[in-house]
Structure formats: C-alpha cells, structure tokens
Image (cartoon, grey):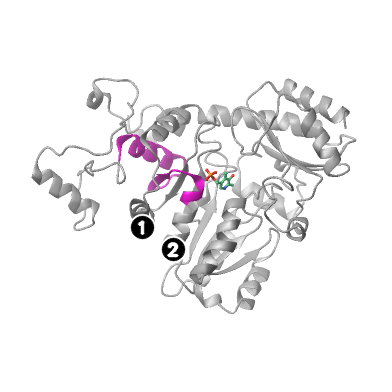
Amino acid sequence: MDSKSLKPETLMLSYGYKPELSEGSIKCPIFQTSTFVFKNAEDGKAFFEVAYGLREKEEKEEPGLIYSRINNPDLEILENRLAIWDDADECAVFESGMSAITTTFLEFLNPGDVLLHSCPVYGGTDHFISHFLPRFGIHTVEFKPGESKQQIEERLKASGHAKKLALIFIETPANPTNALIDIEMCREIADSYSKDKQVVVAVDNTYMGPIWQHPLKHGAHFSIYSATKYIGGHSDLIAGAVCGNSEMMKRVRTLRTFLGNMAAPYTGWLLLRSLETLKIRMEKQCENARVVADFLRGHPKVERLYYLGHLDSSSPEYKIYKKQYTAPGAMLSFDIKGGEKEAFRFLNSLNIFKLAVSLGSTESLVQHPYTMTHAGSPPEHNHDIGITDKLVRLSIGVENAEDLVHDIRSALEKV
Ligand SMILES: *Cc1c(COP(=O)(O)O)cnc(C)c1O
C-alpha cells in the first residue's frame, strides 16, 4: 500500500522505520551513540560529499549516518513523521522550542534587516526579539492582532526600514488571549516586499499544531513548534521542531549542525512514542475544553471568556477561524471578576488542575499570565493586549471532563 494514501495517525506507528535493520525490534531502538562506523572509506567520502553539499544526492541514495550532531536514526524517523502532519517536505528537530525559533531567526536575518512580528508572542521569543536581535543591528516592528494589512504596512513604513523586511514571524492563536492572525495576509505582505529575495513567513504553531492548524497550506514558509507542548504531550521533555520546504529547511538544518542544538536521541525516541497518541490525545483535550468552556460561559464569577469555540459568527475573527482552523483547540483563558486576589484564590483552590506554566500536556494546567509567563513585559504593554491581573489561563488535559468542571466549580465557589 502506498504510504502516502494512509492517514497521518496510521503512519505515526510505522513510517520510516524498518524492523529488519534493528534485529526485528518492533519499536525503533534508542540509538544512543555519538558517531557511526563507515563500512569503508569510500562510503565515508560519499556521506560527507552529500552532507557538505559538495554534490547533490543521487536518486535513491539515502544520506549516510555520520555523527549524531548531523543525523541520527531516532531524529530522522521522528522528522519524517512530524513532516507528515504539516505536509512539509522536511522537518528538523531541536533541543527546545526556543532553539527552533532562534535558529530560524539567525538564519534568515542579517544586520540591517527588519523582523516584523505579531504580539503578544511567547515570553522567551519576546525577550530574544527585544533584547538580543537589536545587538546585531536587526530592526523589529510589531503589530497587533486585528490590525489590517494597510495598518501593518504603515507601521513598516514608519520604521524607515521597510525595504529591508526579511522575516515575518507570527504566533496565532496568540498566547494567552487566543487572538487570531491571518497567515494568508502575512504572506501577501511578504510577497509585496520580496524583491531580490523572498521575505520569509514563519508561524509559531505550538498552540494548535500539528492537528488543528497547518500554516504551510496558508502560505507560511515555516511551521515552528515547541514540541515540549502537545507533540511531547506528557510534561517530561523539552524539544522543538521546524517544518518547511526542502530549500529553506536545508539552511535551517545547516545552521543547526553548526550551533549544535539538535535534540538528543533519547528525546527523539520519547517523541516518537508521543506521536503514536498525538491525535487521540488532542481530540480528547479539545472535547474536554468545550465542556469546560460551556461551563465557564455565563458563570457569575467570570467576566470574559477567551475561547475559539464561542466566537461570534459575525466577527472578523470568526472569518479567520473558519479559514485557518479545524477545531477550537484546548487552550482557554478567562477574566475572573476582581483582580489578582480573586485570581490567586481561584488558582490556590484547584486540586486537579496543576498550578504550572507550559501547556498541551495530558494533565490540565492553570497559570496567571500577568504575574507569571508574561511578567517580563511592561504592564502597559500587557494591558494593551488584554493581559491583566484578572486573566487566568487553562490548558485542558485528558482527564474526565466532569471532574475538571467539578474542580473549577468548587474553586470558583471559594472566590
Ligand atoms: C513553550 C513555548 C515556546 C518555547 O518552547 P520551549 O520548548 O520551552 O523552548 C515557544 N512558543 C510557544 C507558543 C510556547 O508555548
């Protein structure tokens, strides 16, 4: 059977792995090795020619295993499987989501270039953009969800460096407010500024990927992940991934080789295991999130709920939602009536929900973005984008939905 006709969830169990190469082991072993023995010197030469780009790979030629910073079976099989969800040519896995993001930035930005990015973005990404990139003479321009193409282009022009636009980076839905950004519109902006070279569009797809949003289909060049979240899914590892077309991925992979920030074989092995249950986990999480959101809607202690399954069908956001997403996901936030005191009382009264940052795992998590994940941003900036001391963020897990609702109901009663 042609593997291309099989669905991703089926391919996650077998794709790219040949048991006969590993003593018949049904699962891919952990290739806990730094280096690989060449059969002969000619093989070694041939492997390096391909790895260093001295010649193109011949048809049917497999890249030879050389050294675990360059390639390793656990990582290669994982990358081949991850690429399937986004229908990408290639994927590269990293030791963290941050290294996936920063390696992409470093490869596609040069001194004098402009990075256009949405806000809010993940705290670590925000720090890298505002504190690290300027040291290398890279200009950054930010825009907010809801702004039109024209407003964004005006911001670019106002920066005085519009001609040097090199990379557009967006996070949609935005964490923690679930604000949406139109990927197709970003690609149009990128194309209209692409003269000598293509302006690159990269999407942080951690919140909804790789199941409910496929950025490459909407014109993005890269779909980037913190694989620590849904892909890993068990709060037991840190990893990242970048998916895209062969030509651009070659550049990302090459820089990864020289920065040395690839994932370790054991992490790759854990992720292979996680991928087998990715779809059923995420579907259950999504189903649970709807039950929780329906309970929170209209609750007397809830001032406002940020949940994609309740968008007003006449809103501009709903249009983007319909185009870009196949489900409302399993992340939701709400403003509790009151402020930090009420929010903390709620957080401290929960039992099943664990008070921890991160998201996308099997267990449900809760946190207070204003004093936790987003505490590094100036308060005025946070207020501007709806992150206040009233806001609570929930990541819904795979527990029984009624148990989760019971936990939230009891905690809200104590507020
Ligand atoms: C966690 C996260 C990151 C960073 O990933 P790490 O694996 O922690 O390095 C980036 N973007 C988003 C949206 C995240 O949630």
Residue 86's disc number: none
Could you tell which of marks 1 and 2 lies nearer the N-terminus? Answer: 2
Q: Determine which residue is flagged by label 1.
A: 251
Circle 2 sits in a helix, a strand or a loop, which is it?
Answer: helix
Residue type, mark 1 in image: Arg
Classed neighbour count for the residue bearing mark 1: other residues with Cα under 10 Å, few (<14), some (14–19), many (≥20): some
Q: Marks 2 and 1: in contact by CB < 8 Å?
A: yes
Q: Is residue 16 left or right of residue 36?
A: right
Q: Note whether 224 is above or below 107 in the view shown.
A: above
Magenta stretch bounds:
72-100
The Cα atoms of the two marked residues, 1 and 2, are separated by 9 Å
Question: In the displayed structure, does residue 108 sit left or right of residue 170?
Answer: left
- At 44% from the left and 27% from the top, the residue drawn is 273
Front residue of 169/8: it is: 169
Q: Quadrant of residue 72?
A: top left
Task: From the image, tell me which residue sits under label 2.
Answer: 108
Q: Is residue 89 magenta?
A: yes
Q: Quadrant of residue 53?
A: bottom left
Give x and y (percent) for residue 383.
78, 56
Residue 125, given in percent of the width and then of the height, sits at 57, 54
